[in-house]
Every structure is written in C-alpha cells, then in structure tokens.
Amino acid sequence: MRTTSISTTKTNVFWNHDYTAASYAFDTTRKSGDIARAIDAGRADVVIIDPSSHRERTLELIRTVHDAIYVDAVLSGHPEHLASSQGFTWDSGIPTMAIAHSSGLVAAVTEVLSGSSRVAGSLSSGLHHARAGTGRGYCTFNGLAVAAEAALTAGAERILVLDLDAHGGGGTRSLCDPDRVVQIDVSTSGFDAWNPAPSDAYLFAGKDDYLTTIGEALDLAARAGAFDLVLYNAGMDPVTDSGVSSQDIAVREQQVASWAEEHDLPLVYALAGGYAHGGDAAREALVDLHLLTIQAFA
C-alpha cells in the first residue's frame, strides 16, 4: 500500500497496516484495509499517510485518557477480562491495532491545527464506546477522547465532537470535559445513550426523519459558539443496522462537509461504525458507504 509525505494539494487520510494487525477478524479490525485498497485503486482522490511517527505520543495520550490498569491489560493481555472487554478475543495485534487507530487521529489533528490543511481524516473505527477503565462495543481505546486531548494540549480551547454513528457516544462524553469538549450526537439506536451537559445535544432519529434531524444537529452546532476543531465520527451503521438509506447518508456527508466549510472549521473525521452483515457483496457495499465520507471531504 502506498504512503507518502504530507500533501498540500489533496486531503490526507491516515492509515497503515497496523490498523488491521489484530488476528481477530471483524469489520472494525479489517474494513480499513479494504477502504485503503479502494483509495489506492483510485476510488477517492486523497493521499494515504502513515501515522506511525505519532505512535509514542499517542500512547502517552492514551495513558492520560485511560486508567493505567486498563491500558496495561490491553498491552499485555492480562487480566483477560479487561484486555477483551471491547468484545474481541485478545491477541498481540489488538494493542497494535488500537494504538494505530488513535495514532491516525492524533496525526490528523496535528496536521489541521498546524494549518497545513483544514480537513484530514483517519481510517479509524472502534472508538466512542470505550471508557476510562474498560472497552465496550468493539471499542478498545477511545480515539476521539485521545484526539481531543491531543488538540487541547496543542492549544485548542474548544472542540466539537460531532458523532453521527448509529449508537450513542457515551464513552466519549464520560472522558471529556464538557466545558471544553462539546458533544452533539445523532443516534438511531439507544445503545450507549448519554446525558447531555447544557452545551451538548443528544438527538434520536428514525429513518424517515434522519436528514431533518441531521440538519437540526448542525443548526445546534452553529449556535453553540466558536470551535477550534471538529472531530467528526462518521458512522455508516445507520444504514447497515438501522435502515437509513445510503442516499440519505450521501446527503448527510455533503451537508456536514458544506457546513464545516461554510464556517471555516478545521475538521478531522473518523470512519466509526458500519458492518457487513453478509459476504463479499456486503463488504463491498460497506466500502462504498465509507467512501462517501472520504469523497465528500476530498
């Protein structure tokens, strides 16, 4: 897979083979490789960047966000109930994978806050359910909270987490200071619902009012004050798990991209949820869905 140095003419998307290092085979541990191959085949006009130079800094940030006993369990496999608390049987590739998915977001945050570009992405997933001391819902380390911590230590004063995964981002809300990290969440499932702080918004949408609710969420974000960074968790599981149409998701991605551009907001996106409930055709359809995000921000 090609990787190169940072480009100033195309959107950079961070990924390397460590994202798929886990032996445990599941969409969260495999789909980034499928998407990277699609990008490499010319299906999105972006540049893949290797984020490995950010690994050590990311591990420091992970230790800041998560409890030491939990981080050590993920790294070593012991105790097993913590190491596998996200739902994966532990293997030595699990920590490599989990650190890499957070490293890509730290790299993307570093890029946009440096002014090198306004938008960058990472082919990261398995993030927003993880708590300080445990994994949950296929999420090992909370890369959104890690990325927010990276931004705050780099001088950002106020961050928006825009979470459009099908499920709630309760892990992220539990890990971030609501005075500095505002969270706006549109869910289609009650899993990991959370109680909003006064500046937050937690909205529930059905497949028939999905785009209306997305518009409401973006209006709320526009009225929530100034932000130095948007962390966008761009889930595709509203389609694969909740019956929202792929056409509505395509519109959603254009809406978010246009909204961020209109407000001149630095934005970093992650892939988030999306599951191939079937064989090769379902996997290809999932790749197509995630490419909607990458193409919208390219």
Image: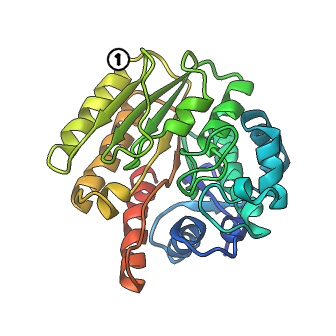
Please, is residue 246 above or below residue 55 in the view?
A: below
Where on the picture, by quarter, is residue 133? top right
Please tell me whether mark 1 sits on a helix, a strand or a loop: loop
Label 1: few (<14), some or many (≥20) within 10 Å?
few
Q: Residue at x 26, y 50 (%)?
A: 251
Left or right: 209, with 124 as reference point: left
Instruction: Give whichever of 81, 276 is nearer the camera.
Output: 81
Q: Residue at x 70, y 62 (%)?
A: 97
Residue that carries the numbered disc 1 in the rendered image? 223
Please, is residue 221 above or below residue 65 in the view?
A: above
Q: Residue at x 73, y 57 (%)?
A: 83
Left or right: 60, with 250 as reference point: right
Q: Is residue 267 visible?
A: no
- The quadrant in which the N terminus is found is bottom right
Which residue appears farthest toward the bottom when viewing the image?
Answer: 280
**Amino acid at the residue labelled 1:** Arg
Please, is residue 62 above or below residue 96 in the view?
A: above
How many numbered marks does the figure carry?
Answer: 1
Where on the picture, by quarter, is residue 4? bottom right
Q: Residue at x 80, y 69 (%)?
A: 92
Which residue appears farthest toward the left when viewing the image?
Answer: 208
